[in-house]
Image (tube, rainbow, N blue to C red):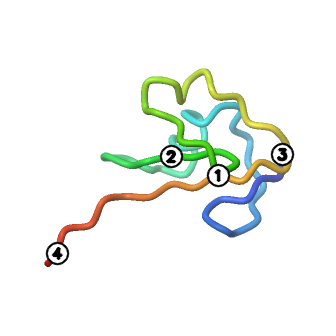
Amino acid sequence: MKIVLNGDPLEVAALTLSDLLQEREVSGRVATAVNEEFVPASLRGSCHLKDGDRVEVVAPMQGG
């Protein structure tokens, strides 16, 4: 399936947001959104991806 991840077109096998994070080897604390809608960590396994979805994954940064 084709999605857009953080602005980059990508072909993935993942069916859910949780699967996508595993497929892309994303670990640690991240925030996720699909089609500009925030998806909490507890709902990532039930958030089914569709062809053309726009997914954003961001990690917190420390600094000052």
Q: Residue at x 61, y 64 (%)?
A: 6
**In the rendered image, which residue does mark 2 sit on?**
32
Contact? badges 2 and 4 (CB < 8 Å):
no
Report the quarter where the N terminus lies.
top right
Mark 1 residue element: strand
User: Label 4: few (<14), some or many (≥20) within 10 Å?
Assistant: few
**In the rendered image, which residue does mark 1 sit on?**
55
Contact? badges 4 and 3 (CB < 8 Å):
no
Contact? badges 1 and 2 (CB < 8 Å):
yes
Give the spatial CA distance, label 1 vs label 4: 25 Å
Give the spatial CA distance, label 2 vs label 4: 21 Å
The dot on residue 63 is: 4
Residue 57 location (% of width, % of height):
51, 54
Q: Residue at x 67, y 68 (%)?
A: 7
Q: Earlier in the sequence, mark 1 or mark 4?
A: 1
**In the rendered image, which residue does mark 3 sit on?**
1
Report the quarter where the C terminus lies.
bottom left
Give the spatial CA distance, label 2 vs label 3: 19 Å
Give the spatial CA distance, label 4 vs label 3: 37 Å
